[in-house]
Amino acid sequence: MKTPQASLMGVGVASPRGGLGQDAAIELALQRCTSDERQQAWLRRVYRHTRVQRRGSVLLRPGEGAEGFENFFPPPLSAQDRGPTTATRLQRYAKEAGPLAERACREALRNSQVEPHEITHLVTVTCTGLVAPGLDSELPERLGLSADIGRLNLGFMGCHGALNGMRAASGLVRELPEARVLLCCVELCSLHFQYGWDPQKIVANGLFADGAGAAILGPADSQAQGWQLIEAQSRIAQHSSNAMTWSVGDHGFEMTLSSEVPKLIRASLGEWMQSWLARHDMSVRDVAHWAIHPGGPDILQAVTQALSLPEQADAVSREVLAEHGNMSSPTVLFVLERLRAQAACGPCVMLGFGPGLAFEGVLLA
């Protein structure tokens, strides 16, 4: 196995304080996305198939019910009504993203026992908001980081953004051995809820939620407790450019999620993973834990089938999906945080999938 590139010093996560059960989410979607009984029956099936039981949203307040969602996304006035403009949605992003990201970062700092003034670099990841100055300027002020901190913002990468962020953070640590890098991912997917009858967008409505995750990476240390980052790798699946897309529309950011995604994973993931692990004198059987981004139940099933994993290999990912929904980039950090809380040890592979279709992996040991 190669020399570690960085130590994973701490992880922290945060979800909005207000949430919505799936039954309530179904009722809200029915009013905004369907026009007849056939469409309503299909939407109910899709939402229940996601296996999401509850999701957080910055639009909701504790004990408020669905009022905040309904106020921001009022019932359509006509069949052509597509809800708030993108500008209105991004204004709400600018208000809500910072406080949620701050909570995740403070948790990561606490778990790592690193003081804010020790952080030398900040890597921010988001694909649900576009604003400048953004999180890379807001978080130093909120957290008391140095005004001289190095900043790197990774935008619009989608669900595998945290893994790209870990690659960037480990590169900074390799270049500067004294570096302490704070990685923060925050996504407010609920701000991009889509109106109208479009099956692919309804699938996204049924899956996605809000959340933030953070991690602190420092110099590799053979004596350190916990996981070391060994290597990050990526692969773009062939002939997959339209399998998953994420684009800016007039009424929010719009996702397409083809039913071909699980097939592409089954066709390509196994060979890529085997060749990658072989470079470390490992096989799939040598991996003790899998932190798989829970893009949806079909994606999790495709991963376990492609890699012939044991039945419980994706159990933590399924728990996170059920309790939080798919929060895009921070979701895999929720899985990793839960594994760390269980005192998991031994090699761990983090996996994420995003527009492309791109595979991203991080090997921890």
Image (cartoon, helix red, strand yellow):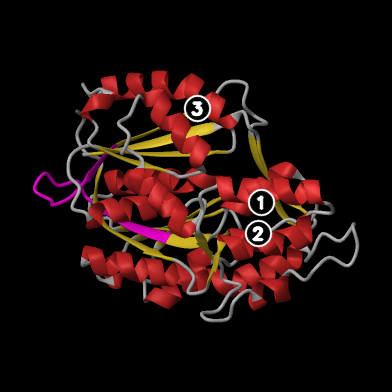
Give residue 26's mark: 2
Q: Examine the image and state in which quarter residue 245 appears.
A: top right
For the residue marked with disc 1, what is the amino acid? Arg
Mark earlier in primary sequence (3, 2): 2
Position of 35 compared to 58: left or right?
A: right
Measuring from the top left, give residue 197's x and y in whole percent. Answer: 80, 49
Residue 272: give its label.
none
In this view of the protein, which residue sits in the foreground, 176 or 217? Answer: 217
Q: Is residue 275 above or below residue 365?
A: above
Residue at 8% from the left image edge and 48% from the top image edge: 223
Q: Which residue is mark 3?
A: 265
Highlighted magenta segment, given as a residue range: 213-230
The residue that disc 1 covers is: 44
- Secondary structure under the numbered disc 1 in the rendered image: helix
Residue 199 place in picture, x, y as percent? 73, 43
Q: Amino acid at mark 2?
A: Ile
Q: Residue at x 68, y 63 (%)?
A: 27
The amino acid type of the residue labelled 3 equals: Ile
Q: Position of residue 68 (x, y in %)?
A: 65, 76
- Residue at (77%, 71%) from the top-left corner? 74
Closest to the camera, between mark 3 and mark 1, is 1
Residue lying at the far left in this picture: please name it: 223
Gap in angstroms between the C-alphas marked 3 and 2:
29 Å
Quick check: marks 2 and 1 in contact, CB under 8 Å? yes
Are circles 3 and 1 on residues that touch, CB within 8 Å? no
Residue 154 in view (yes/no): yes
